Amino acid sequence: LAAAQRHGARLLAEARVDRVELGDGRVSGVRGLLRGEQVARPFHVAAGTVVAAAGALRTPLLLAASGVVHPQLGRNLRLHPVVAVAAFMAEPVEAWRGPSQAARSLQFCRAGSPDAQGIGPAHGGFVIESAPPHPGLFASALPWTGAREGLALLDRLRWVAPLIGIVRDHGSGRVRTSRGGRPRIEYRLDRADGATARRALVEMARLARAGGARRIMSVATPPAWWEGADGDAGFERFARALARQPTAANRVSLFSAHQMGTARAGADASAHPCDPGGRVRTDTAGGILPGAYVGDASLFPTASGVNPMLTVMALAERTARAVLADRR
């Protein structure tokens, strides 16, 4: 933003765009509300080029509200659903200090077969990472079994090493506008992605034990526990329980920081609301809305399987190059 301002960009804070305006078959600007004051004020920006970058949960809704009609807009939502375990260590960890997320393992990032022990199921790919929680986020993520138990867990947060398994989801969901005007997310783990989530729990538990954890808890309702005193036999029972963890709603706890794919880019106009350069399509025959582009994770054709930040940056540059090429 600082670089853009140095090059002449004008920034509007607290500005919510309600729709992209169209005129004579092309983009003519945007309209919305400035919400930084006590009374919201309407604003209008005249522009022949608009790049939507409202994220995979809001970009498709903005385009739909602006009159863009494509049957795949808002569909193909990938979330990188995340499962977690809490490893209670012998010494304080204080996960909220220092680098917020400094370790990961790509050992299972590609699809794999069942493990040699006959416990962990086949999987579609996942990444193990250290989680970056502050105490408030910790508290919201922990399973709730009662006030006394919840306070006891919070009292031990200093000793917790949180591990997360980021599932490369092959199933998908959708996002559309609710009656209140907000994004309504519809998503369920399919059977294969559920198996991947269970394998991630098993491998994270093994990693936590190898790292010296005294206790391990799966983040689920209800949680499963392993105590160091349970020994090898107890750990095998624990791992087998994780391999059977139900993934229905309100059972295993799922988190998401990566939303992708709801205005995906591709050559096939019938399946992709945007072309490979991020240009917005108006129909399944390949018609392009002049001046309209997407520059965020909505463009992902499918889940990346790894943290998507660098890919988002690359796609944004690709879209910028398309904007420049169309101006020539």
Image (cartoon, rainbow, N blue to C red):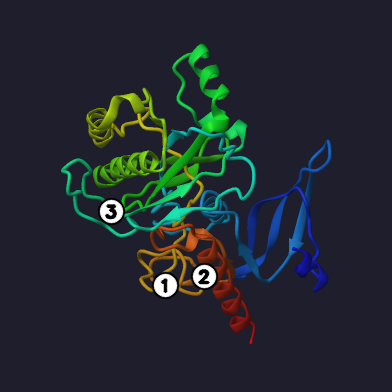
Among numbered discs 2 and 3, the one appearing first in the sequence: 3
The reply to whether the C-beta atoms of the residues labelled 3 and 1 are less than 8 Å apart is no
Q: Between residues 65 and 239, which one lies in front from this camera angle? A: 239
User: For the residue labelled by badge 1, is the local secondary structure a helix, a strand or a loop?
Assistant: loop
Q: Nearer the viewer, mark 3 or mark 1?
A: 3
Identified at 48% across, 16% down, the residue is 149
Q: Amino acid at mark 2?
A: Gly
The numbered disc on residue 278 is 2
Q: Decide: is 102 above or below 7.
A: above
**Residue 105, numbered circle:** none
Query: Tag 1 or tag 3, which sits nearer the N-term?
Result: 3
Going from N to C along the chain, the mark reached first, 2 or 1, is: 2
Give x and y (percent) for residue 317: 58, 73
Residue 225 seen in the current view: no
**Element on which disc 2 rests:** loop
- The residue sitting at 57% across, 69% down in the picture is 316
User: Foreground mark, 2 or 1?
Assistant: 2
Q: Nearer the viewer, residue 215 or 5?
A: 215
Against 269, is 241 above or below? above
- Say if residue 49 shows up in the picture: yes
Q: Which mark is residue 124?
A: 3
Q: Residues within 10 Å of mark 1 (few under 14, many from 20)?
A: some
Residue holding disc 1: 286
Amino acid beneath label 3: Gly
Q: Quadrant of the C terminus?
A: bottom right
**Residue shown at 77% from the left, 43% from the top:** 35
Between marks 3 and 1, how big is the CA–CA gap? 32 Å
Instruction: Find numbered disc 3 in the image and state the secondary structure of the residue it sits on.
Output: loop
Q: Residues within 10 Å of mark 2 (few under 14, many from 20)?
A: many
